[in-house]
Amino acid sequence: MVRKNSASSFVVALTITFALGADASAQVLRWATQGDLQTVDPYSQNELLTNAINGQVYETLVGRDRQLKLTPSLALNWQQLDPRSWRMQLRPNVKFHNGEDFSADDVVFSVERARDPASGLRAYASALGTARKIDALTVEFSLAQVNPIFLEHAALVPIMSKTWCEAHDA
């Protein structure tokens, strides 16, 4: 009989230990850095920490894999039509945080907004040339001059929702 109670006590003690252990692992994470996030507007500042944090929220047309090779992101594929024009087919069924569909309108808007003289990403967006919507999921870029690193620039310009920006006067 004593053994039975010992076994049950052991099970109860073990259950309590696991329960307390689970709570102990849920701790507050404190993070410190020399700088602060400057803004959540991805075009306002071109600063490393701000870009890194905003990169967790906004996506670009082209991304990078673990070997830092260029990979599709919001653009599913692309082709260079001639030395000064590129066409990108956009990924279907992408939605913004508010449920809106992502489309070529958002790309055209984002590139134009990032080209603004006040933008910290103006150099990258300007290097993409003029973006023009072909259809809902196709964008064509016309460049003023040849840009041999066009895709590198496409990996640096975050895409925002045109509708959201206009509704919030951004």
Image (tube, rainbow, N blue to C red):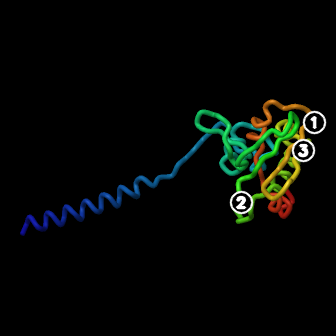
Q: Name the side, left or right, on which 101 lies relative to 81.
A: left
Give the residue type that dot 1 points to.
Answer: Ala
- Dot 1: element: loop
Mark 3 element type? strand
Residue tagged 2: 96
Q: Position of residue 45 (x, y in %)?
A: 79, 41
Q: Residues within 10 Å of mark 1 (few under 14, many from 20)?
A: few
> Residue beneath label 1, please?
144
Of callouts 3 and 1, the N-terminal one: 3
Image height of 57 relative to 149, above or below: below
Q: Amino acid at mark 3?
A: Thr
Relative depth, front residue between 38 and 155: 155
Which sits in the foreground, 23 or 125? 125
Which residue, given by chain and number where applicable, does mark 3 sit on?
Answer: 130
x 78%, y 53%: residue? 160
User: Which quarter of the rendered picture does the N terminus lie within?
Assistant: bottom left
Quadrant in which the C terminus is drawn: bottom right
- Of all residues, the one furthest to the bottom in this rendering is 1
Q: Quadrant of residue 49?
A: top right
Residue 106 sits in which quadrant? bottom right
Query: Please, is residue 169 above or below residue 123 in the view?
Result: below
Q: Position of residue 43 (x, y in %)?
A: 81, 45
First along the sequence among labels 3 and 2 = 2
**In 3D space, how far apart are the residues under numbered discs 2 and 1 (Cα atoms)?**
31 Å
Separation of marks 3 and 1 at Cα, in angstroms:
8 Å
User: Residue 151's x, y, as percent?
Assistant: 76, 37
Front position in the image: 79 or 109: 79
